[in-house]
Image: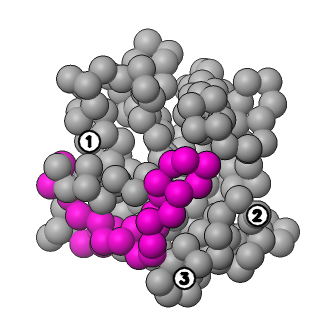
Amino acid sequence: MLTTTLSFQNMHQHGDLFVNLLRARRKSFIVRNNWRLPEAEGMEFDQYDTPASRWIAVHENGEVLAGVRLTPTTARVGMYTYMIRDAQRGMLDSIPSDLMDFEAPVDPKIWEASRIFVSNAVPARLRKKVQGDLMYEMIRTARSLGAHKIIAFGPAVWPRWIGRLGLRADPAGPVMVLDGVKVQVAVMNLDPRLH
């Protein structure tokens, strides 16, 4: 099992991994969760998949088992910034604007984690390892990019399952149900003394 951080600068070195990640996202978010998201050629994508982002994939033998997208909170592409902030500003019909308890930050030391998933194909006996590999690579990558904190929009169980890994994330907004899935914003402090 491998964990790889992809960027626009290195994705050419990893064959079909980026395409497979977008296909796995489609299976997770469009097929499994029944979310109405952009898709083409069997891949899920949106306006936040830009050169400013990084994508982390846990994969084995060409199959993506888990993934997450990291985007700086300073990102700006046309009228869009990053998912949590744009939702808070009322720009996204699919996500309520009251998703956070405070104003979404714009800070080079804070990155957003979104599109967090673990494939249903991962057997129960391997889930903790896959989740751990994903989270530890996310933390390592975010720190290497200068992040001190990550704000995440993902499954409401996220703070609990990373707790089982010895990590901590604090809820930063209400638990919401989007198309039958419980989601929540959480904040993870990347201080090395905590992780």
Q: Residues within 10 Å of mark 3 (few under 14, many from 20)?
A: some
Q: Based on the picture, tell me whether residue 50 belongs to the magenta stretch.
A: no
Q: CA distance from mark 2 to mark 3?
A: 21 Å
Is residue 113 visible from the viewing direction of this image? no
| Side of 115 relative to 12 (left or right) | left
Q: Based on the picture, tell me whether residue 177 belongs to the magenta stretch.
A: yes
Residue depicted at x 17% and y 49%: 164
Label 3 secondary element: loop
Label 1 secondary element: helix
Circles 2, 1 touching at the beta carbon (< 8 Å): no
**Residue located beneath label 1 in the image:** 132
> In the displayed image of the protein, which residue is found farthest to the bottom?
103
Please say if 8 is above or below 169. above
Label 2 secondary element: loop
| Side of 34 relative to 105 (left or right) | right
Q: CA distance from mark 2 to mark 1?
A: 32 Å
Closer to the chain start, of discs 2 and 3, is: 2
Provide the residue span drawn in magenta. 165-191
**Residue located beneath label 3 in the image:** 105
Q: Residues within 10 Å of mark 2 (few under 14, many from 20)?
A: few
Residue depicted at x 35% and y 54%: 158
Circles 3, 1 touching at the beta carbon (< 8 Å): no
Closer to the chain start, of discs 3 and 1, is: 3
Please say if 148 is above or below 57. below
Residue depicted at x 64% and y 37%: 34
For marks 2 and 3, give the one nearer the viewer.
2
**Residue located beneath label 2 in the image:** 93
